[in-house]
Image (cartoon, rainbow, N blue to C red):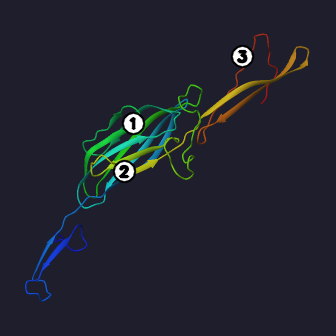
Amino acid sequence: PGIPQGGEGLFNQSLLDVNNDGQADEIKTACDDIPYITHRKSFVSVVQTGTNTYRVVYRIDVENTGGTTGNYDLIDAPGFDDDIIINSTSYTSNAPGVPGGTLLGFGPWSLASNQSLAANGSHNYFVTVNITLNLSSSSSGDRVYKKCGQTIPGRLSRGEGLYNQSKIDVNRDGNPDEFSEACGDIPYIFHNKTLQSITQTGPGLFQVVYNIVVRNTGGTSGNYGLVDQPLFDDDISILNANF
């Protein structure tokens, strides 16, 4: 320990032969280290918070497996389905000097700038996005939900589901050196009701049939509860009901 050797870092040696006998008369060495910063992004969770509204959490892990401290810039760039609206965004981090907080607008968002990371160190970032999925006629998108991996099977693409991409720049030239992506899907459950038929079964007696269709046009399974509530004219008596 403490003595640089071949096979370590940027170890380099020079050999000087002053009598031309093929044997080194003097050997000098030099060695230094470089950082090696990488990152990966993962989809952590999605929790429904209201009617077609969700809280989505992503995680970004930045690691330096090199031999000395390095710096990096980190960007988060959402690329959701065009029917998804971003309501608010925030993030937290354990990186020194990065307190986290609210992220404004619709991205891309800068999470860290010229952030220092020691050798064998790691930083964790959690990005939370509150979103609404709108597939109704009022949507500004195409009203068709594209699930993760739909455009090119087996490959994630912008414009699908909850697609999100992170970018890291380790030499601060303004061009990302590494990209990492994650994607998740959400359901979109709605229903329609129609009066299917009215059949007279006797004097003042009728059988009325309603049809309720529940659909999920989102990208993954969802759950629902369904209640039917008659609000007839007060002169109508219900004798029995079934479904």
Tell me if 122 is positioned left or right of 237 in this view: left
234 relative to 27, above or below: above
**Residue holding disc 1:** 107
Residue 217 seen in the current view: yes
Amino acid at circle 2 = Asp
**Are the residues at dot 1 and dot 3 in contact (C-beta closer than 8 Å)?**
no
Tell me if 225 is positioned left or right of 67 in this view: right
231 relative to 10, above or below: above
The residue nearer to you, when weighing 208 against 215, is 215
**Residue holding disc 2:** 61
Mark earlier in primary sequence (1, 2) = 2
In the figure, residue 145 lies in which quadrant?
top right
Amino acid at circle 3 = Leu
Residue at point 46%, 45% (across, down) = 44
**Residue holding disc 3:** 231
Label 2, label 3: how many angstroms apart (C-alpha)? Answer: 55 Å
The residue nearer to you, when weighing 152 against 95, is 152
Numbered circles on residues, count: 3
Q: Position of residue 29 (x, y in %)?
A: 15, 72
